[in-house]
Image (cartoon, rainbow, N blue to C red):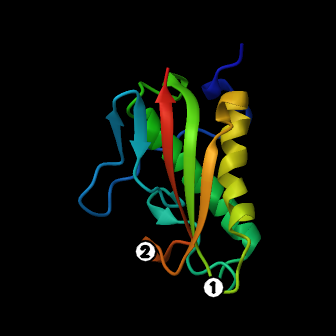
Amino acid sequence: MTTPSQRLADLGLELPPVAAPVAAYVPATRAGGLVLTSGQLPSVAGSLVCTGKVGADVTPEQATDAARTAALNALAAAASQTGGLDGIARIVKATVFVASTPDFTGQPQVANGASQLFVEVFGEAGQHARSAVGVPVLPLDAPVEVELTVEPA
């Protein structure tokens, strides 16, 4: 059986280092039988992949890619509490915040960037409950932010 870490490698991806918090919080915490992550931004090597509002400065396609990057960062944060990616039994819930213009209504499609990654990496165990929420602004002017609830193995 193929493990999540093998599927991630097959996608040409690897877990990044856990992003350092930008304020007074921890990237992830374990509570009972779950791990909850703080919101993770679409950063690579400490820099945001893009900034601005979806529907103005950022295209829906760029935002979908950014959601995928933020989701990878969220997986890294969750894995830091489960002994690695293969220590995650399933993705329970994802919340995807999308900084967008008032007339933009494609938040669910942007959030699919994250959701599809979870299914690609975890298969059926990557199917999850989800909220896709439009907001006026996110930290550091990020276009998306992803937070996760996972069940450890």
Q: The N terminus lies in which quarter of the figure?
A: top right
Rendered position, 72 above or below 67? above
CA separation in Å, label 1 and label 2? 17 Å
Q: What residue is at 55 percent from the left and 55 percent from the top?
A: 95
Density class for disc 1 (Cα within 10 Å; few <14, some 14-19, many ≥20) is: some
Residue placed most toward the observer, 9 or 136: 136
Position of 15 with respect to 65 (left or right) is: left
State the image quarter where residue 97 is shown: bottom right
Residue at disc 1, secondary structure: loop
Residue placed most toward the observer, 6 or 137: 137
Q: What residue is at 52 percent from the left and 41 percent from the top?
A: 75
Give residue 55's position: percent from left, percent from top: 70, 82
Density class for disc 2 (Cα within 10 Å; few <14, some 14-19, many ≥20) is: few
Rendered position, 114 above or below 104? above
Q: Which residue is mark 2?
A: 140
Query: Is there any visible trace of residue 120 in the rendered image?
Result: yes
Position of 117 with respect to 92 (left or right) is: right
Q: What residue is at 55 percent from the left and 76 percent from the top?
A: 51
Q: Which residue is mark 1?
A: 101
Mark nearer the N terminus (1 vs 2): 1
